[in-house]
C-alpha cells in the first residue's frame, strides 16, 4: 500500500486498541493540533484525506493546552485511551514540553507528534531550525527527550515499522507509560513508501495485571500479621487499576485504616468510617496523627513524594516498616520498603485471601474511627467559612460541593489542591481530578475539555485561581467550538496568594506575588468581562448567598459557564504537617532569622529510610 509517512501514521493510529478485563478502548481516540509549515503538508493532509478512519481532529489555541487536555482525558479513562498531539516545527514543539513533563511525571499516556527539520538537510537551515556549533543533528525537539518515556526521530519512512509498535507498547504499559514523542521531519512526513498491508491490521494491546510473586506476597502477609498499627496509603495506582472494591474488602475485613494521596483520593468514599482522609503536607489531622505512630505503612500505587511523607518527617515510630505495592519497581523499593511489584487490584485481592481471619486490634480500629469523627467535625468547621458576608476559598469549595455533590472537581496548582484534598467530599475516584505530580498552572481549563471528551455525564467543575487563569484561558474558545460543557469557578484573590502565603511563612515580606503595577498599587482585572468576551456565560459573586444563587442558576445548564468568586486572600485553610522549604541562613529581616530557627528545629524530625 503506497502511502506517505503521515498517511501511514494516521492509518496505523486509527486501528490501535487496548484491552483490559475483556473491555476494549481506542488507544488513540483522536488528534489535537495546531498547524504550521512543518506539519500542514504532511499530517494535515493525511488527517484531511483520511477522515473516514474515525480519527477526529480538534484545533486548539495553545500547544501546551492540548497536551494537558490529552492527559486529563487519559487520567479519566484510567490510562486506557489517550489522544495524539501534533505541532509544527519550532515554538509549537517546545510549547509541548511542559505538558510532556506533566504526563511523564504523572505516568499518563500521550502521543506527541512534533514536526522537525528537514531530514535531507538540503534547505538547511530552515525557518525555526536550531543551529548548534558542535552538534549537526541537534533539534529543539531534543528538549522533549528528557520528559518523554520513549523518543524517536523518524528520518526514513521504514523506521515507522519498528518505532510505532514500540510507541504503542509504552503508551499502553501501566508501569512505563508517559509522554511518547515521535519527531517527524517535515520532508519525511510527505515521502511515500510501499507499506505492507499487515501493518494496518487492527492491533490490540493487552494491559497487563501482573500478580505479586509468591515470596513477595508472603513477606507482605508476615509484616501485616506482625503489625499492631498498620496504615494503608491509597495512591493513584488504586484508581488506575480499578482496585477500590478490593481495597474496601481488605479494609473492612482486616480493620486497617486508609489514607489518601492527591491521585488516590476517592479510593474509598469520604464517609467510610476507616477513611481518614489525606496524608502528609496537605493531610488531615486524623491521617497524620495515626501515621506518626504507625508501625507498618502499606503504600499502594503511590510514588511516596515529599507531600505524602511530609518531607520524610511524618512517620516517627522507630519500628515503622513499609510494604510497597506498585507496578513500578523503583516505587516499590522506596523508603526501604518490602517491594511487591504487582497490579494494585490483584495484590490487594490476594493479600485479602492470604490473611485468613487476621484483623487489627479492636482498640486500634476504635482509635482510628474516633480520629475520623474528629476530623470530619473539623472539616465541617472549615467549610462554614467565617462570620460576615465575605467569601473564603474554603467556603467556595464547600458551597460548590453542596450544590454538586456528585460533581467532578478539577484543579492543579496554588493553594486550592491542598484545600480541595481536605475539603472536597467525593464518593468515588472519578469525582476528584487534581494534577499534582507536576502541579502545572494552566492545566485546569484544558483538563475540563479532557474530562468532557471522556464522555463524563456529571457536572465538571474547574476550580482555578486568577493566576492560573491569566496563564491559560484560551481553551474556553476550544470548548465552545466543540460544544463541551463545564463550569469554571474562578477564585479571584489578586495574585499568586499560595506562594505569598509561603513567602510569609518563611519570614519574608510580600514581594513579586500580588497583582500590582510597577508602583505597588493593586492592579484591577475585569475577569468577568474577559470570560464573557471569550463566549462564556458569566456570573460574578462576592457573598455566600450570591454564590449559591449563581450555582443554582447554572445547574443543568449547558455550555461554558464561569463564576468569578471574589475571596479574602488572608483567610487560608490551615496545614497540619511540615514541608521542607529551606529558609535563608543569613538575612537582614528578623522574621526570616526566626523562621530559620523554626526550620532547623523542624528538620530534626527528618528520618532516613534505608
Image: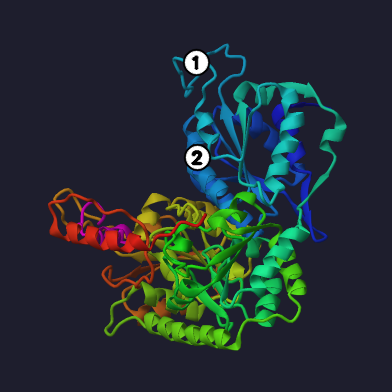
Q: Residues within 10 Å of mark 2 (few under 14, many from 20)?
A: many
Residue 136 coordinates in the image, percent (x, y): 52, 15
Q: Residue 243, image x and y in percent? A: 69, 67
The residue that label 1 is drawn on is 125
Which residue is located at x 28 percent, y 68 percent? 569
Instruction: Work out whether residue 534 or residue 184 is closer to the camera in this orientation and state it.
Output: 184
Left or right: where 567 falls relative to 484: left
Q: Position of residue 63 (x, y in %)?
A: 51, 42
Q: On the rendered image, what quadrant is the N terminus found in?
A: top right
Q: Nearer the viewer, residue 445 or 294?
A: 294
- Residues tagged 2 and 1 counted as in contact (Cβ below 8 A): no
Regarding mark 1 in the picture, which secondary structure is present there? loop
**Residue 517 shows up from this direction:** yes
Q: Nearer the viewer, residue 570 or 400?
A: 570
Colour scheme of the picture? rainbow
Vertical position of residue 513 compared to residue 16: above or below: below
- In the rendered image, residue 429, in percent from the top left (x then y), is placed at 60, 69
Tell me if residue 50 can be seen.
no
- Hey, which quadrant is residue 251 in on the image? bottom right
Circle 2 is placed at which residue position?
97
Q: Residue at x 72, y 42 (%)?
A: 168
User: Outermost residue, top direction?
Assistant: 122
| Residue located 82% across and 37% down the image | 200
Mark 1 surroundings within 10 Å by alpha-carbon count, few (fewer than 14), some (14 through 19), many (20 or more): few
Give 86 or 610, whichever is nearer the viewer: 610
In the image, taking residue 289 as reference, residue 67 lies left or right, namely: right
Amino acid at each position: 500500500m503506497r502511502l506517505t509517512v503521515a498517511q501511514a501514521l494516521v492509518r496505523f493510529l486509527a486501528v490501535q486498541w487496548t484491552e483490559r478485563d475483556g473491555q476494549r478502548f481506542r488507544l488513540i481516540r483522536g488528534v489535537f493540533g495546531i498547524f504550521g509549515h512543518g506539519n500542514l503538508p504532511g499530517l494535515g493532509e493525511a488527517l484531511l484525506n483520511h477522515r473516514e478512519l474515525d480519527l477526529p481532529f480538534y484545533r486548539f489555541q495553545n500547544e501546551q493546552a492540548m497536551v494537558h487536555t490529552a492527559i486529563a482525558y487519559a487520567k479519566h479513562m484510567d490510562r486506557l485511551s489517550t489522544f495524539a498531539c501534533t505541532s509544527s516545527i519550532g515554538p509549537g514543539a517546545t510549547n509541548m514540553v511542559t505538558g510532556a513533563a506533566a504526563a511523564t511525571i504523572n505516568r499518563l499516556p500521550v502521543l506527541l507528534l512534533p514536526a522537525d527539520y528537514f531530514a535531507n538537510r538540503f534547505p538547511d537551515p530552515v525557518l525555526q531550525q536550531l543551529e548548534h556549533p558542535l552538534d549537526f543533528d541537534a533539534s529543539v525537539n531534543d528538549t522533549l527527550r528528557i520528559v518523554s518515556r520513549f523518543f524517536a526521530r523518524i528520518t526514513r519512512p521504514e523506521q515507522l515499522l519498528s518505532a510505532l509498535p514500540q510507541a504503542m507498547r509504552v503508551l499502553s504499559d501501566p508501569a512505563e507509560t508517559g509522554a511518547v514523542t515521535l519527531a517527524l521531519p517535515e520532508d519525511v512526513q510527505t515521502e511515500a513508501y510501499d507499506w505492507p498491508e499487515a501493518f494496518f491490521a487492527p492491533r490490540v494491546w493487552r494491559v497487563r495485571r501482573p500478580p505479586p510473586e509468591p515470596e513477595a506476597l508472603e513477606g507482605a502477609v508476615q509484616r501485616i500479621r506482625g503489625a499492631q498499627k498498620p496504615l494503608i496509603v491509597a495512591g493513584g495506582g488504586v484508581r488506575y487499576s480499578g482496585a477500590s472494591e478490593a481495597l474496601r474488602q481488605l479494609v473492612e475485613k482486616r480493620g486497617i485504616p486508609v489514607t489518601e494521596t492527591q491521585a488516590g483520593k476517592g479510593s474509598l468514599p469520604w464517609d467510610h468510617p476507616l477513611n481518614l482522609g489525606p496524608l502528609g503536607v496537605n493531610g488531615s489531622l486524623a491521617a497524620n496523627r495515626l501515621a506518626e505512630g504507625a508501625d507498618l505503612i502499606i503504600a499502594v500505587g503511590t510514588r511516596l513524594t515529599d507531600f505524602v511523607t511530609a518531607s520524610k518527617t511524618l512517620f516517627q515510630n522507630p519500628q515503622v516498616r513499609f510494604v510497597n505495592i506498585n507496578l513500578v519497581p523503583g516505587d516499590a523499593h522506596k523508603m526501604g520498603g518490602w517491594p511487591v511489584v504487582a497490579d494494585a487490584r490483584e495484590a490487594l485481592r490476594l493479600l485479602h485471601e492470604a490473611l485468613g481471619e487476621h484483623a487489627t486490634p479492636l482498640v486500634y480500629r476504635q482509635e482510628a474511627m474516633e480520629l475520623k469523627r474528629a476530623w470530619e467535625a473539623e472539616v465541617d468547621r472549615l467549610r462554614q467559612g467565617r462570620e460576615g458576608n465575605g467569601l473564603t476559598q474554603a467556603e467556595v469549595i464547600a458551597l460548590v460541593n453542596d450544590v454538586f455533590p456528585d460533581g467532578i472537581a478539577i484543579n492543579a496548582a496554588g493553594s486550592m489542591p491542598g484545600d480541595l484534598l481536605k475539603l472536597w467530599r467525593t464518593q468515588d475516584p472519578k469525582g476528584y481530578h487534581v494534577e499534582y505530580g507536576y502541579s502545572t498552572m494552566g492545566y485546569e481549563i484544558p483538563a475540563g475539555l479532557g474530562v468532557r471528551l471522556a464522555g463524563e455525564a456529571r457536572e465538571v467543575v474547574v476550580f482555578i485561581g486568577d493566576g492560573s487563569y491569566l496563564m491559560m484561558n484560551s481553551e474556553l474558545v476550544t470548548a465552545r467550538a466543540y460544544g463541551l460543557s463545564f463550569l469554571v469557578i474562578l477564585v479571584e484573590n489578586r495574585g499568586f496568594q499560595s506562594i505569598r502565603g509561603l513567602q510569609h511563612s518563611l519570614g519574608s515580606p510580600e514581594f513579586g506575588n500580588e497583582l500590582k503595577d510597577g508602583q505597588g498599587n493593586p492592579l484591577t482585572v475585569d475577569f468577568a468581562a474577559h470570560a464573557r468576551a471569550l463566549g462564556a456565560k458569566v456570573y460574578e459573586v462576592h457573598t455566600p448567598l450570591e454564590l449559591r444563587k449563581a450555582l443554582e442558576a447554572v445547574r443543568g445548564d449547558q455550555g461554558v459557564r464561569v463564576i468569578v468568586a471574589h475571596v479574602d486572600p488572608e483567610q487560608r485553610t490551615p496545614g497540619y504537617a511540615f514541608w521542607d522549604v529551606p529558609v535563608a541562613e543569613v538575612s537582614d529581616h528578623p522574621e526570616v532569622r526566626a523562621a530559620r530557627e523554626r526550620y532547623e528545629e523542624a528538620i530534626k524530625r527528618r528520618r532516613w529510610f534505608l
